[in-house]
Image (tube, rainbow, N blue to C red):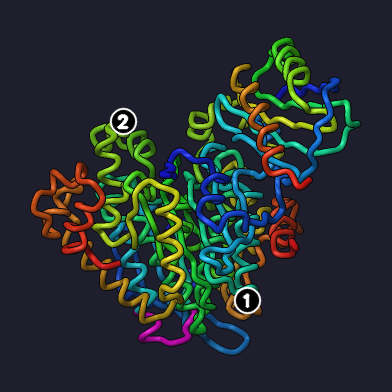
Amino acid sequence: MEHLDYELPSRPQPHRREPLLVGVVGSGNCELLLEGGPPADRCRISIKTSAHGFAPIWTAVVADFAARAAAGGLQIEINDVGATPAVVSLRLDQAIEAWEESANV
Amino acid sequence: MNREQLLPQLFGKTWKPTQSAENFFLGSGEVGTEAGAETVQVIGTAGAAEVGVDLALAMAGAVLDTMRRHPGRAILFLLDTQGQRLRRRDELLGLNGYMAHLAKCVEIARSRGHRILSLVYGQAVSGGYLTTGMMADACYALADAEIKVMNLPAMARITKIPLERLEALAQQSPVFSPGVANYRRMGHLLEVWQGDLAACLGTALHRPLEDDRRSALGRERGGRQCAETVAERVRAHA
Amino acid sequence: MSRSYYEASARERLAGVVDAGSFHEFVPPAARVTSPHLAQLDQPVAFDDGVVVGRATLAGRPVLVAAQEGGFLGGAIGEVHGAKLLGLIERARTERPAALLFLFDSGGVRLHEANAGLVAVSELIRAILRARRDGVRCLGLIGGAGGCFGGTGLIARCCDRLVMSEEGRLAMSGPEVIETARGVEEFDSRDRALVWRVTGGKHRYLLGEADRLVEDDVDQFRAAAADLLDSEAGLTLAAVEREHARLQQRWQRFADCDDAPEIWQRLGVDNPAEVPLLPLDQFLAVADGCRSAP
């Protein structure tokens, strides 16, 4: 298993809600757990992946996501089984969408 | 140990067979206890029996028969099984349904006051053990018996984890590798029997009955450190 | 709108089967109650260990519900996964919901923690049967991509009632396991038609192993489950004796059959070869006239 941790600047996410789980820990897929916690303009992303040696790709994918999405104030933990960058990006966007859809506030 | 060695050690000359096939046997024997001699009804498999539809049905029938003819008598499963029969015909007929039926018969017997005990004297593997011996109020095994889901080479093939890795981990972890000692640490086996087997059975017949506390035993013995806690958290979650 | 039950994840199925917005999860993912055994084998964990448990309402009535995620290690039962199910069953004994609902999607015991998994399966079988003696109504739904095999196939057949789709599969040993042990002549696991003939919903319905057969649609599973909330529940000697007679009769009638169509023919199906192709409504019209009663 490889562990990767990031803390990135991101636009504040305006909505608050209960922790949210998206995706499945299956081959070529990943699950994401979203929770509040970090400062409003920071996004923390923590990855555990069974695919070794892809740190540069993860760095690019999460930097791109943090720049594009309103993920500030969110902590995102990912359990990954070799999802492609495209799948990871899709799951991240789905997660933000789901977070906003069923937000409490 | 084979059944010819086992039965005299458990019952001496009191063993009365009522059915004896290559892979299946029924009968009764007497066991001396503090309260005098007690008769025990035996349902046994032998010769590393494969449990198919026919054998599951025969065992279920034996449990129902015991309820009819000997209300309240203790039932002892004596097991040597290589697991469920791996045949298309058995699956066509719904082997899991037959095995589940056996489990239901055992549960009904328990509810009607039959004490249910099991002893693995040969091997016990997965499906052959789940709805027979594992349904007992208290599960026992001989020290030289074998209990497993599958052997490590097959496990390595299916999980794609190198065999050397599994073998090395098996030295320190009781959680996946075969062995009676591991199933004791899991909390599944109440005890491993050695020495005077008749005395072991006599004691087992008078142990206070309690609900399934294998999760708690697994934590006490360090084999399953979280099962009991997790179940409790689910029970108590607001 | 029709939504495939087979393609959906455990959480999607669960959300669609119970009343909208009514689900409340016990020990949710944020509690991070994960398997303590997978890390040593370099396997990723899942925050819910592959099973979602909680309470909800179904048709306005309280239910306790569990959904297995077949996408995570085949939905297989390990220590934590099993303990979550066990806690839920024990909870049902005191809470007395209208039903205890299992959305099965699992290959059985998780090999990475095989001993803990096997013991857990035996605890679950005992707990379900004990709960049924108390009158807790246990309903199982089978239509996920992982099927329902091994220990989970036993647990399922310990329930009061089962709902399946044609796509659902229910058996003891999976076809791959049999092929590995006995060769491709015994069971060709790549022959999808054969696999579904032997383990699929239509055969299980005709045999009387499944109580309801529905389309591969979340809403149809929901409707069937809601409908079964008033079905007879309990585990009695009389019921077990009736089952014994049925199983004995099945064995006497079909023990020499090599493939499902032979059984269907003996049951009285006119054109057994057509059964796999029949749409659900036409199949039910044929099957309900001749199938073995559950």
Going by the numbered disc 2, the residue's amino acid type is Arg
Q: Is residue B68 magenta?
A: yes
Binning the other alpha carbons within 10 Å of mark 1 as few (below 14), some (14 to 19) or many (20 upward) gives: some
Q: Is residue B65 visible?
A: yes
SS of the residue under disc 1: helix
Q: At 59% across and 38% down in the image, what residue appears?
A: C112
Q: x%, y% of residue C200?
A: 31, 47
Residue C111 vs C66, above or below: the answer is: above
Binning the other alpha carbons within 10 Å of mark 2 as few (below 14), some (14 to 19) or many (20 upward) gives: few
Q: Is residue C31 visible?
A: no
Tell me the magenta residue range. Answer: B65-74
The residue that disc 1 covers is B203
Q: Is residue C68 left or right of residue C193?
A: right
Camera-side residue of B225 and B183: B225
Residue C270 vs C240, above or below: the answer is: above
The residue that disc 2 covers is C190
Camera-side residue of C4 and C106: C4
SS of the residue under disc 2: loop
User: Which picture quadrant has residue B52?
Assistant: bottom left
Question: Can marks 2 and 1 be said to lie on one chain?
Answer: no
Q: At 34% across and 39% down in the image, what residue appears?
A: C175
As measured in the structure, the alpha-carbon distance from the residue carrying label 2 to the one carrying label 1 is: 52 Å
Task: Return the residue found at the far right.
Answer: A39
